[in-house]
Amino acid sequence: HLRDRQGRQEGRVLLGAHRLGRSADPPQERLPSRDRKPLNADLSGLTIGSLTLNPSFDKDVTEYTASTTNATNKVTATAADETATVEITVGETEIENGSAATWETGDNTVTIKVTDGAVSKTYTVTVTKS
């Protein structure tokens, strides 16, 4: 271990069982808790083509509405954490992030589920096609 200027230990912590000079398991490397980033299931951006989300996008708001006369619009959801996964469904149909959603006349529910480890968050947009 190294010590920083304030005399605190720095470096990685090795975990493992050692008994009688033999290792029962290979050591596992774990970052000290101050070096681990918190899990984040927020979106940093959400667009549905050129539609206006109401209210305007905010990572802490999970319910939106939008209106369109278009047959389709591209749905793009950007996770705040690059390790998070994003699943998008329109009604019961899963679509790929960045691909076009096809709208039925009336209300269409777009569900965006962001998952980072054990943490998940769901955003919902109701797109009304006239």
Image (cartoon, rainbow, N blue to C red):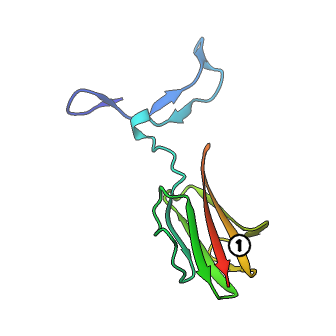
The total number of labels drawn is: 1
- 3 or 113, which is in the foreground? 113
Quarter holding the C terminus is bottom right
- Give percent across and percent down for residue 73: 64, 82
Q: Using the rendered view, name the quadrant where residue 24 is placed.
A: top right
Could you classify mark 1 by the number of other residues whose Cα lies within 10 Å: few (under 14), some (14-19), or many (20 or more)? many
Residue at image mark 1: 108
Task: Name which residue type carries label 1.
Answer: Asn
- Give percent across and percent down for residue 26: 62, 29
The furthest residue to the right: 92
Q: Using the rendered view, name the quadrant where residue 93 is placed.
A: bottom right
- 94 or 69, which is in the foreground? 69
Residue under the point 51% across and 46% down = 39
Residue under the point 74% across and 82% down = 105
Q: Is residue 56 above or below residue 80?
A: below
Secondary structure category for the residue under label 1: strand
